[in-house]
Image (cartoon, rainbow, N blue to C red):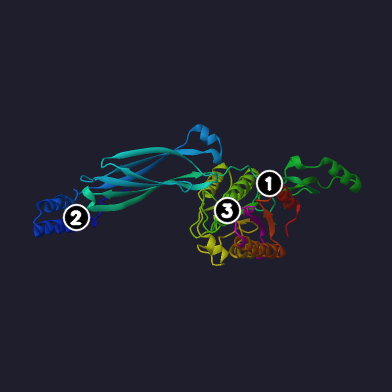
Amino acid sequence: MRGVPTWTWTASPAVAVGLGAVLAATGLVLGRPDVALLGAPLLVTAALGWQRPAAGEASVAVDVEVGAAADAAAGVAGRSVGYRVTTSTPPGTELSLLHLSLVGGRSRLLVLGPSTTELTGRVALLGVSGPQEVVRASLGLVAPDGGLVAGPLGPATAERVLTPASSPARDLPLPPGLRGLSGVHDSSRPGQGGDFRDVGPFTPGDRLRRIDWRATARRSRVAGEVTDLYVRRTLATSDAVAVVVLDSRDDVGEVVAQWASNRAGLRGVSSLHLARQAASAIATGTVRRGDRVAFCDLGAHGRATTVGSGDRHLRRVLAAVATTRAAGSLTGSLTGAPTGVRRLPPVPPSALVYVLSTFLDDVAGSAARTWRSRGHRVVAVDVLPAPRLGGSTAQQRLAHRVVAAEREDRLDDLRAVGVEVVSWAGASGASGRRAQLRALSRRRPR
């Protein structure tokens, strides 16, 4: 970031002039030349302080280097990156103050010289996925003798995006209706590619290799002569459409005592990290199965992808999931007045809708009920982390009990209207999630 600094006066020249004048006047009144001479350095210093630095630009730039291969292979929790901060000051600057804010809440204030300076370092990233601001730098300038100051210039920031580490979800449920003329699932209409349906008379358009000669012979023995040919008819195949809707309006950690401050380095595993994992696993499992998937962020400025399939489309979906960031605030969700709510995204007919949310307010639940009333099969994926009450006060424990009771009522209301609920952060871990999804896949959608 570059710019021409705007210099402002400080109180140093005025104080120096006033004190020097007082000492000079006192020396003249008392007839003490030595006292009068004490004010001379102050007056000279004030005169030098009135000189403005030469016009010129100042800049502060931040670069983040990709971590070593060993760090990238260590997973999200073990990754680290290097950073480089470069500053330059205009001529006549005596000092520059560089304020660095590093990932995890750490900050440093450095006093640098007037020349171009380059600082390098390495910092460990947080053990969560998504965008992380690695370095935030701002630069302040000081003229000789502190008479003039400028800035702060910036801030200049640099961030890294960590993709969530998750395996493809298996045993995913199917929507109430299948679409398309090809796929991996048997539809209810006759066609080609699916399982055996029945035996029927040969009609124009049937292939000769589908003639069932045994059935034709049996029918001819009954009739006495061969009048019709009979073919084996099969079911057509179709694919399923899944829409993954992620609620990014808040990002809640597992440490209840940090819900008020919500500091990234102290809150533990966050709900948005679990939501990214769930969205990536569901999208990958859907595409690997041969179906189509779409992604939408419920936040006002969230990203969205259209319905598609294949590895190229999956990479676009995973990139949109990885760059999802919290669009609202925890306070808004707890008070029932969330911010940054977009209108409901369009959902294709006969689609399976996954709603990933903490359900701390009624917005995500209301969207799930709306889609369910339109005939879609809706799966509500609860991504609120398992709470850790250690270090919380009695008031915080009581507030958590109230919030948890209200949230459970919302989930019960969703179950009452036919929305299926899956807990992604349950105590049983990955095996529990697979069991819940397997149970949903065995149910027949209504």
Point out the image quarter for the C terminus.
Answer: bottom right
Q: Would you say residue 189 is visible in this rendering?
A: no
Residue found at x 86% / y 42%: 217
Residue 54 x/y as whole percent: 18, 48
Tell me the chief SS of the magenta region. Answer: loop
Residue mark closest to the camera, 3 vs 1: 3
Look at the image and say whether residue 369 sits in the magenta stretch: no
Q: Disc 2 vs disc 3: which is toward the camera?
A: 2
Which region shows up in magenta?
Answer: 373-394
Residue 67, position as x, y percentages in the image: 47, 36
Judging depth in this view, the residue of 378 and 330 nearest the camera is 330
**Occupied quadrant, residue 216:** top right
Label located before the other in sequence (3 or 1) = 3
Q: Residue at x 8, y 56 (%)?
A: 31
- Picture residue at 57% right of the left edge, 51% below the top: 270
Q: Is residue 29 left or right of residue 218?
A: left
- Pointer 2: what residue? 16
Within 10 Å of disc 2 (Cα), the crowding (few <14, some 14-19, many 20+) is: many
356 to 215, vertically: above or below: below
Identify the amino acid type marked 1: Gly
Read off the residue under disc 1: 429
Circle nearer the viewer, 2 or 1: 2
Q: Which mark is residue 91?
A: none
Q: Callout 3: helix, strand or loop?
A: loop
Q: Position of residue 269 (x, y in %)?
A: 58, 49
Disc 1 crowd rating (10 Å Cα; few below 14, some 14-19, many 20+) is: few
Q: Is residue 406 above or below residue 390?
A: below
Residue placed under numbered mark 3 in the picture: 253
Distance from label 2 to label 3 (Cα)?
Answer: 53 Å
Tell which circle, 2 or 1, labels the residue nearer the N-terminal end. Answer: 2
Of the residues shown, which amino acid type is indicated by label 3? Gly
Residue in view at x 13 percent, y 58 percent: 26
